[in-house]
Image (cartoon, rainbow, N blue to C red):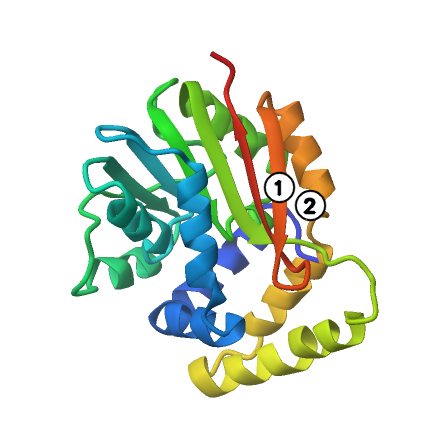
Amino acid sequence: MTHLKGETRARYVQDMFARIASRYDLMNRLMTAGQDVRWRRDAISRAGLQPGDRLLDLGAGTGALAREARRQCPDCYLIAADFSLEMMHVGRARTDNAVTNWCAADALRLPYSDETFAAVVSGFLMRNVIDIPLALSEQHRVLKPGGRCVVLDTTRPPHNLLSPFIRFHMRRVIPTLGRLITGEADAYTYLPDSTEQFLTAEDLATHMGLAGFHDVAFARRMLGTIAVHWGSKAV
C-alpha cells in the first residue's frame, strides 16, 4: 500500500491504525523482542526534560512515549496527540496510564501556538506522514528556542551480510505475526513496506537540518532498521 499518495494514503493509514489499535502494543513487543521499550527510554532521555517542561508526544498512538516521559520526569506537562481516535481510546483505557491530556491532531497542521513546547517527540510517526518537510516544519514551529525534537522511527537498513535475514523477518515473520495476533495481515505488510520505502537515517537528518534544527544527530538500532534522531531549535 506504500504506492498510495496524498490524502488517499493518509486515510488508509488512519483506518489501518484504527483496526489494529487494540493489539498494537502487543505486536510492538513481539516484533521487536521487547526492544521498543529500550528505544523509547533512549528517545525520552534525549529530550532532556526538566520539571515543568511542556512535552508534545506527536503521533502518540497509545501514549507509550508519553508514559515513559512521565516515568523519567514526573513533573513535566504532557500532551499526547494523534489523528487516530481509536489508538488514543486504547491508551486512555490503560490502567497504568499516567497521561491525562489527549488531543486529536494532524501532524501537518498542529493546533498549537508558536513556541509552546520544550520538547516534541514522536515514535513511528514520520514514515506515515504524507509531507515530511511540512511535518518537521510544524514541529520546529511549536518548539521554544532551545527546545529539542526527537524522532524514533524505522529506517531503511544498509545492505550487509544480514540483509537476507532482515528481509525475511520483515517480509515473512512480521506479516505472519500480524495475521495471527491481530487478524490484519495487510497492516503488517504495509509496515515493513513503509520501512523499506522510508528515508535513510542520513536523509532524515538532512530534512531535519533543512527544517531549521541544529546539532542534528542519530543513532541506529536493531541491525540498522531503527533510528533515533535528535536536534534542537536555535536559541
Quadrant (top left/top right/bottom left/bottom right) for the N terminus:
bottom right
Query: Which amino acid type is shown beneath numbered disc 2?
Result: Ala
Contact, CB < 8 Å: mark 2 with mark 1? yes
Q: Is residue 229 above or below residue 25?
A: above
Local secondary structure at mark 1 = strand
Determine the CA span between mark 2 and mark 1.
Answer: 7 Å
Query: What mark, if any, has residue 201 been given in the picture?
Result: 2
The type of residue carrying mark 1 is Phe
Q: Residue at x 73, y 39 (%)?
A: 203
117 relative to 107 in the view: left or right: left
Local packing at callout 1 (Cα closer than 10 Å; few below 14, some 14-19, many 20+) is some
Which residue corresponds to mark 1?
218
Estimate the x, y position of residue 143 in percent, counting from the top left. 42, 23
Mark 2 or mark 1: whose residue is earlier in sequence: 2
Identify the residue shown where x is 42% and y is 47%.
59
Residue 134 image-quadrant placement: top right
